[in-house]
Amino acid sequence: MRFMVMIKASADSEADMEPQEGLLLEMGKYNEELVRAGIMVDGAGLMSTSKGARVQVADGKPIITDGPFTEIKEVIAGFWIWNCSSLQEAIDWVAKCPIAHGQDRFEIRQMHELEDFATEGEGYEQHKKVEAELAAQKSGA
C-alpha cells in the first residue's frame, strides 16, 4: 500500500527557516533508513506559501490567489510517499521521525491505486499507458 505522509506547516517552515545542522543530519539518516527498509518512494520539503499560489478554475479561467496564506494549519510543509504494509506501519515510522518529537504535525493518507477504480476499459488502458511512460522516464529509457 502506498501512503502519502504530509508534514504540516509551522511558523518556522512558513518563515523559510533552515533546520539546524544537527537536525538536517538526523533527517538525512532517517531518510536513509526509510530507503534501506524499502519504505520511501519519494519525498521533499516545500517552500513557504509566500512563494506559491492557489488556483481555482471557474468557467475555464484560473482565479489565482498569491501566497502567503494565513491558515498555516491547513498548509503542507513537506511530504513523503511510502510503501507500507498497513497504516499502522506508517504510523510507526512517523513515530521514529526526528522532527516528530517537536511541534510538527503529520497527516497520513493511503493513496488510491488505479485498480481501486477499474481493471479494464479505455480509461484503464490510458492510465496504464501513462504509468508505463513514467516508469520509462524514471529508468532513463
Image (cartoon, helix red, strand yellow):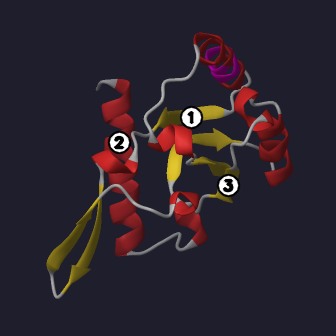
- The residue indicated by pointer 3 is 107
118 sits to left or right of 131: right
Quadrant in the picture for residue 108: bottom right
14 sits to left or right of 126: right
Residue reaching furthest to the bottom: 59
The secondary structure that dominates the magenta segment is helix
Identify whether 105 is placed above or below 36.
below
Identify the residue at horizontal 43%, vertical 40% (top origin).
46
- The residue indicated by pointer 2 is 134
Observer-nearest residue: 123 or 3?
3
Sequence-wise, which precedes: disc 1 or disc 3? Answer: 1
Type of amino acid under label 3: Glu
Identify the residue at horizontal 66%, vertical 58% (top origin).
109
- The residue indicated by pointer 1 is 41
Observer-nearest residue: 37 or 69?
69
Write down the region rendered in magenta.
27-31
Mark 2 lies on a secondary structure that is: helix
Identify whether 85 is placed above or below 61.
above
Type of amino acid under label 1: Val
